[in-house]
Image (cartoon, rainbow, N blue to C red):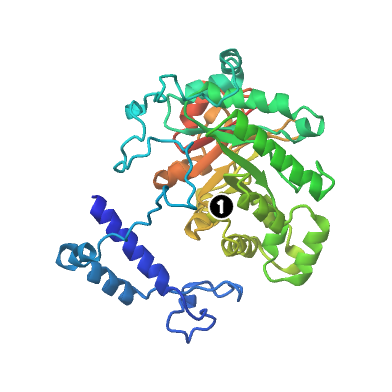
């Protein structure tokens, strides 16, 4: 198995080297695969074979023929050695490990097998739990509605995130206290994936300046990384500029109207590692671009082309978010309408390889107290919900947001029904 993995590594390395060449700006370039892209793809987004399918087959054949003899003959690269005794060479003396070579998968320190706690050479325990959350704080978190919901979810097959809003706490000077409470909730139940700490980031009016916005993201991410080590961090936002595509008038207006929802700033947050997941809302795509004759399908296509072109998925997981399936009382979509909506707003982002997951709001309440649902009241069946239940093959890529303080029926009933459609759930906590 180890040799086979090394074969694939060398093949991949060889293919990447073959990618060096003249950019595929035209269809006349033999390495161009622009013909596989949509007609309205911007000119700066190009497709180019690193190796054509025929070349890739020849490369694989060269390395794998004769039971991989060419791979065996290539041998390992000569190691680079440093003689610490040679004058002028300096070698660290405080490095971790025992200074000996180990096979892949073998623990570096004796006693660390099977997840055990290794001991330092002088006998004391050298592993320290980095979490600053106490047992009492975890116990208190378990008694909250979200804590109880997380325990109930442990009996389902859904992955769990904690969803909250820390922007107001940050502005009130209470970030440390609020972050610790959320971290305790994430730590209270084993299996919680991560924390989504803000929504409409840069789109709403919470922050007045770009510097203030940047400081919030940086300081909140740093606090949560310290308090909840190992948990992923996520944020939600809207970036209207992305839906404009190549329309300059649209881009100028969206930049003026939403100056903090800047793709370059968002890309910097991702590159710096502040976020592990970024959710992009689709709600504005339906009506925001009519002035420029950009319909919802075009706006969505423009957004995801821009996301791919910026390679945001190289830094974080990208999610699409949609509240449009829900309606006052319950969804009124017919089976045909529901199928069309699923195709356009769920299947398309996934098939375009732009979003890796899609988050649907299945139940939410507006400012007037009116409840909007995808399913019927008290889980009554309807066409939209029945069509969503048929998406079993992509269930792991579908997520929803659930407020355990405002259940439809009760925790057990609600979460059981949600688990029939969704592979992930964001537990909302105030």
The residue pinned by badge 1 equals 315
Crowding near the residue tagged with mark 1, few <14, some 14–19, many ≥20 C-alpha atoms within 10 Å: some
Does 132 sit above or below residue 254? above
Q: Nearer the viewer, residue 424 or 165?
A: 165
Q: Give the position of the C terminus as an image quadrant.
A: top right
Q: Quadrant of residue 4?
A: bottom left
Q: Is 192 situated left or right of 171 in this image?
A: left
The structure residue drawn at horizontal position 55% and vertical position 27%, both measured from the top left corner, is 130
Q: Is residue 108 above or below residue 355?
A: above
Q: Is residue 63 left or right of residue 281?
A: left
Give how far across and how far down residue 61 sits, in percent: 23, 70
Q: Nearer the viewer, residue 403 or 22?
A: 22
Residue 33 lies in quadrant: bottom left
Q: Nearer the viewer, residue 165 or 281?
A: 165
Q: Classify mark 1: helix, strand or loop.
A: loop
Residue at figure coordinates x 75%, y 48% from the top left: 202
- Residue at x-position 72% and y-position 71%: 247
Is there any visible trace of residue 40 in the rendered image? yes
């Amino acid at each position: 198995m180890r040799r086979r993995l090394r074969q694939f590594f060398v093949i991949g390395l060889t293919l990447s080297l073959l990618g060096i060449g003249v950019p595929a700006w035209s269809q006349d370039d033999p390495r161009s695969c622009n013909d596989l892209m949509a007609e309205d793809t911007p000119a700066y987004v190009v497709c180019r074979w690193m190796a054509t399918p025929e070349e890739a087959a020849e490369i694989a054949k060269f390395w794998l023929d004769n039971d991989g003899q060419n791979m065996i003959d290539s041998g390992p690269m000569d190691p680079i050695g440093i003689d610490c005794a040679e004058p002028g060479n300096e070698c660290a003396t405080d490095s971790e490990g025992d200074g000996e070579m180990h096979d892949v998968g073998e623990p570096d320190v004796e006693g660390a097998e099977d997840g055990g706690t290794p001991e330092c050479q002088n006998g004391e325990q050298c592993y320290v739990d980095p979490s600053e959350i106490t047992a009492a704080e975890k116990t208190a978190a378990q008694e909250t509605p979200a804590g109880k919901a997380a325990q109930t979810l442990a009996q389902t097959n859904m992955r769990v995130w904690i969803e909250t809003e820390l922007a107001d706490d940050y502005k009130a000077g209470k970030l440390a206290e609020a972050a610790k409470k959320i971290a305790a909730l994430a730590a209270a139940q084993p299996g919680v994936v991560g924390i989504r700490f803000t929504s409409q980031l840069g789109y709403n009016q919470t922050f007045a300046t770009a510097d203030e916005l940047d400081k919030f993201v940086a300081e909140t991410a740093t606090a949560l990384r310290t308090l909840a080590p190992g948990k992923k961090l996520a944020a939600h936002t809207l970036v209207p500029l992305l839906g404009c595509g190549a329309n300059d008038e649209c881009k100028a207006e969206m930049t003026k109207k939403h100056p903090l929802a800047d793709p370059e700033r968002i890309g910097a947050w991702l590159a710096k590692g502040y976020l592990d997941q970024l959710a992009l809302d689709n709600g504005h795509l339906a009506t925001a671009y009519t002035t420029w004759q950009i319909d919802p399908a075009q706006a969505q296509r423009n957004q995801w082309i821009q996301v791919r072109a910026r390679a945001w998925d190289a830094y974080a997981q990208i999610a699409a978010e949609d509240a449009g399936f829900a309606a006052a009382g319950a969804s009124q979509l017919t089976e045909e309408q529901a199928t069309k909506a699923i195709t356009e707003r769920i299947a398309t982002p996934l098939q375009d390889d732009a979003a890796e997951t899609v988050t649907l709001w299945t139940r939410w309440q507006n400012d007037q107290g009116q409840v909007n649902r995808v399913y019927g009241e008290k889980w009554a069946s309807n066409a939209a919900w029945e069509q969503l239940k048929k998406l079993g093959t992509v269930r792991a890529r579908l997520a929803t947001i659930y407020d355990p303080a405002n259940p439809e029926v009760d925790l057990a009933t609600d979460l059981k029904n949600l688990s029939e459609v969704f592979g992930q759930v964001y537990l909302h906590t105030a």
